[in-house]
Image: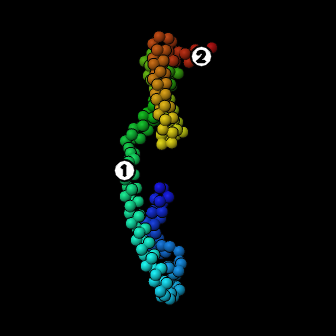
Amino acid sequence: MSLLRSLRLSQHLRQGSAFAHMPKRPYSASNPSPDKPVKATADAVKDETTSEKASDEKKDDEKKDEKKDEKEVSKFVMPNYVDGSFHWSYERAASVALIPLISTQVIYGAHPVLDGVLGLVLPLHLHIGFDACITDYFPARNYPRANKYLGWGLKATSAAVIWGCFEFNTNDVGITELVQRTLTA
């Protein structure tokens, strides 16, 4: 199908102004060079009429193929610009939010509210990164089942990590205190 589309594109480009000087097909007995004189014979006339019939049939077939291609193209979901722009914005916002969160924790020490926000933003940042890896290495068009299972597994794991961060921050020492104790031990 892509070969057919590329052939149509090359035909379309040849009909344009940039390729107008190029012949539509190589020179042959039925399509002689304009520099060479041609003798009109009965065989040449027969060849021309059969080639005209063949070209008419070819055009009809191409029109049918174009209609089929239009139907096939309409089956695909068109890309949505809004989803991509929001995803990119969320990813950048999570990355930028980590800078002041971590630097504030390092400068001032542990704080329960900042630990809670860090316990939410850090897993979100990791989720977006791993989701990008799954999308890149297991695209849905090539690996539909693997993409679906890995996506759901990532969602479940991210939810469990967020719940674990919440539990660790509320029932134990907190993320920042754990890191400080690990570094000073």
Marks 2, 1: nearer the viewer: 1
Q: For numbered disc 2, what is the local secondary structure?
A: helix
Query: What is the residue that sits farthest to the top in this orientation?
Result: 171
Q: Horizontal and vertical percent for residue 91? A: 45, 35
Local crowd size for mark 2, using a 10 Å CA cut-off: few (<14), some (14–19), many (≥20) = few
Q: Which residue is drawn at 43% across and 68% down?
A: 58
Up/down of 36 relative to 160, above or below: below
Nearest the camera: 41 or 92?
Answer: 41
Say which residue label 2 marks.
Answer: 182
Question: Residue sitting at 45 percent across and 63 percent down?
Answer: 8
Counting from the top left corner in percent of width and height, residue 90 is at 42, 34
Please state the horizontal and vertical placement of residue 131, each as a whole percent of the image: 49, 34
Q: Is residue 133 in sight in this rendering?
A: yes
Q: In the orientation shown, which residue stands out farthest toward the right?
A: 185
How far apart marks 2 and 1 lie (CA) works out to 57 Å
> 66 or 82: nearer the eye?
66
State if disc 1 and disc 2 touch (CB < 8 Å): no
Residue matched to label 1: 74
Amino acid type of the residue tagged 2 in the rendering: Thr
Residue 98 appears in the picture as rendered: no
Q: Which colour scheme is used?
A: rainbow
Circle nearer the N terminus (2, 1): 1
Seen in the picture, residue 16 relative to 154 is either above or below; the reply is: below
Q: State the quadrant of the C terminus.
A: top right
Neighbor class of circle 1 (other Cα within 10 Å; few <14, some 14-19, many 20+) is few
The three-letter code of the residue at mark 1 reads Ser
